[in-house]
Amino acid sequence: MSSVAVSIHESYREKLRNNRLGLWLFFVSEAFMFGGLLAARFYLWREDGVVVRPALDQQLGLIVTSVLLLSSYFMNRAETAIAHDDRENFLSGLLITAFLGLVFLAGVVIFEWGGHIKPWDGVFGAVLFGMTGMHALHVLSGVIFILIIWWNGRKGHFSADRHWGVEACAIYWHYVDLVWIFFYPALYLIGRVVH
Amino acid sequence: MSLFSLPAVKGLIAQILGTIAGMALTTVIRALMGLPAWKAEPAWVVGALLGGVAFLFAVGAFDDWLQWMVGKETPLRHGPPPDRPAWTRYFSVDYNHKVIGIQYTVWGLFLLMAGGTFALAFRTELLRSGMQFLGLELFNNFIGLHGIVMIGGILLGVGGMANYLVPLMLGAEDMAFPRLNALGFWFNVPGALLILSSLLVGGWDAGWTGYPPLSARGPIGYQLFFLGVYFIGLSSIVGAVNLLVTILHMRPKGMSLFRMPIFVWGVFATSLIQLTATQLIGLSFLMVLVERTLGMGFFDPGLAGPGKALLEGGGDPILFQHLFWFYSHPAVYIFILPGLAVIGELLPVFARKPLFGYKWVALSSLAIALVGFLVWAHHMFVSGMNPGLRVPFMFATLLVAVPTGVKFFSWVGTIWGGKLHFPTPMLFVLGAISVFLIGGLTGPILGTVPTNMPLHDSYFVVGHFHATMFGGFVFPFFAALYFWYPKVTGRMYNETLGKIHFWLMTPAFWAQTLGQMTVGVMGMRRRIADYDPALGNGMIQAGHVVITIAGFAIAFGVLLMIYNFIRSAEVGKVAGSNPWRSRSPEWQIPSPVPEHSFAAPVTVVGEPYDYGLAGSTYVRMAAAGDD
Ligand code: HEM
Ligand SMILES: [Cu+2]
């Protein structure tokens, strides 16, 4: 093979290096979008200069948050498993993560959105639905990502030293989780409760 | 070969069908929910979104990834399509960065000409006071379309230069993510089409800034404008990821950061802004979009009736301005950093002298990018925002003058005592410096609170930013087109036509921008279709006549350039590999650049700009075969 051909078919390792940096840059970019939503929340949820928040179902908030945090543990377990060629725990970890992700989504979409605040209810509704909606969209895409990885994993793809797809999926899932760690207190905990 | 087998045409058809399908889907869902089935606005939103996505699928931008999803690996496609004529690769998803660079550039030039046409229309209307032929509605639509279509064109021009040049200048085989690169370009086609087609559904009349409450209440055209900008924003973001990874990871041996061509530094700084700030214009427009579609009251203070403020009251339009300018001020640096870097790139070639203060110039691009994030509220001095923010933002704004000044010193220092040559690209570089100086000097006048207050929203601002955008982007972009034309086509453009273009455009532009500032000081408001002919002691109309004539002269110059490029591609004399005697890697390989640019790995052994230093070398290419 000529040297050109070698440089075109870069080694897996080189591609991995590029992919990792690319993914992290994408997260930096997304952080600005989520940051903008947080800025909007603290800008709009104020009364006489004091930070306020609506009365939300605290139990629900705690449950969905715990479920999401727990899912990150199983995601990590799946990734570690494939790094050790342990297919069984890899596949089960993915399924459990996806399931917990769906539970989180159900909690947000059915119960939180079914509560007394609607999108058209002033800045409370707008920000609540804006933030949870944007986050839920990311969770949903994460679940789809996990299921695609699971489906391919079941067919025998991925191995201990070639599983960038799994790694990307896992980091993405943790990232979406991390965003919620900022959103949860902003929506549920910080500020004086009004209405 | 039938026209319908062209991927771009397939994409167009899919966009139309996708739009119809989206509208039908919305109608069915509404009917199922027991709502009145047909409502135009949500139908258009869903339709436009699905249409844009359908374009991307049909053109083939997702083909490889869809394969990956089902576990198949696909090798990277190379070369022209096997079953179609070679030219069709420019209308297809092609993974070669040189093809993508040309796609960006040509689509960008098209948008710049479309946007310019809107301007010529309303400039003609402004020749006399009173309304002649445009009507108030259409006038407002045209100023907004002119603004945003030009911005789209500029972003594409930046993308064109960056995609074509960065891998070549680094001595890299291609970009880090060729498939993402193609997707990044194709986002722009449905995006631009959405923006242009907004005219069909009532247009939008708030200018390119789309401020609510007006934008939260106006016609449906706004929605297509928002979605179109969103698509183009996605292109900016994925393009920036790609360029940053390429610059950080794809440099050959010896190419340390401070040995990169200065243009690469400009692109690096620009990409940092595009990566991050773009999210905020996307978010702010998305928020207005859902405010209109779902009644989510982010911005319009009067959306809901009076009552309990937080649950029923509306939002705050000032918040929109913060989010919007957090992108749109840094955006101006997205436009100019690559442009100013072109100036730094070409001056040493035509002065046969090292670039003065290379490291400082490189770092000044980063400094401008960073400080540029801290000045956005200088657009809002009179908006009603917290007045305590004015002075900090004023000082931050004036601080930008420091790194910008560094660049000016470098240019003067490079020209000083050089053996100057004046072919067309060099003329455009010098024109750029003269024009950017006008823009740069008027910036601080606007950035200072007391002088801003009477000038805000006047034609003075229009004059200011046209000077910065022409000096910082348009002139350097044209310089770059003339300079790299022989590299791209292998032939020389016609020098006489190039010089006529320059001597037509430069004085015309000075007249235009100084004319805009003058009528602004006379009292001409920005974005207003009519004016009192008594303003400026009756001189204001003369000012408008000058601006309009100058605008047509510039347009004629651009047409001349396009003619020159099309004609010279056939009859121009063969250029050879390095007509400008440049040291940059891309000039050490044949013109036009072969499919796989470098036949052998590149090694960097010296400094990039040591022009005139005997025996200095920048890059060395291993002879093919030895490795
Ligand atoms: C010396 C540095 C600069 C300073 C201090 C400066 C300052 C300002 C200020 C204060 C305004 C707001 C005027 C108003 O609406 O009241 C403004 C508007 C504008 N500037 Fe600059 N500017 C500078 C450089 C640039 C550059 C390099 C560009 C870009 C290419 C640029 C593009 C614009 C644009 C597009 C607007 C108008 C935005 C709009 O309202 O539509 N400026 N500038
Ligand atoms: Cu600004």
Image (spheres, coloured by chain):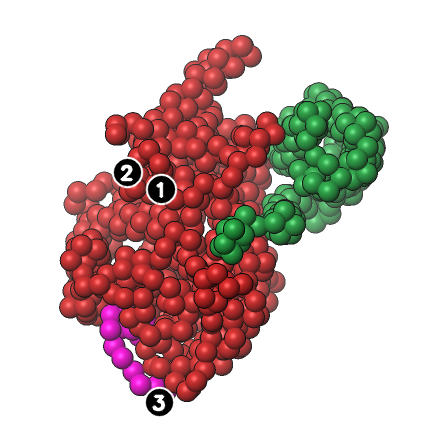
Mark positioned earlier in the residue sequence (1 or 2): 1
Q: Is residue B447 visible from the viewing direction of this image? A: no
Asked if disc 1 and disc 2 are in contact, CB closer than 8 Å, the reply is: yes
- Callout 1: few (<14), some (14-19), or many (20+) C-alpha neighbours within 10 Å? some
The stretch drawn in magenta includes residue A178: no
Q: Colour of chain B?
A: red
Q: Which residues are magenta?
A: B416-430
> Which element type, helix, strand or loop, lies under badge 2?
loop
What residue type is disc 1 on? Pro
> Which element type, helix, strand or loop, lies under badge 1?
loop
How far separated are the C-alphas under marks 1 and 2?
Answer: 8 Å
Q: For this rendering, which residue is in front, A189 or B166?
A: B166
Mark positioned earlier in the residue sequence (3 or 2): 2
Q: Is residue A99 above or below residue A74?
A: above
Residue indicated by mark 2: B85
What residue type is disc 2 on? Pro
Q: Which numbered marker is on residue B417?
A: 3
| Residue B242 appears left or right of A16 | left
| Name of the residue lying farthest toward the bottom | B417
Residue indicated by mark 1: B80
What residue type is disc 3 on? Gly
| Residue B255 appears left or right of B164 | right
Chain identifier, green in the render: A
| Residue B40 appears left or right of B491 | right
Q: Chain of mark 2?
A: B
Q: Is mark 3 within 8 Å of ligand 1?
A: no
Check if mark 1 and mark 2 are on a common chain.
yes
Report the mark closest to the observer, 3 or 1: 1
- Callout 3: few (<14), some (14-19), or many (20+) C-alpha neighbours within 10 Å? few
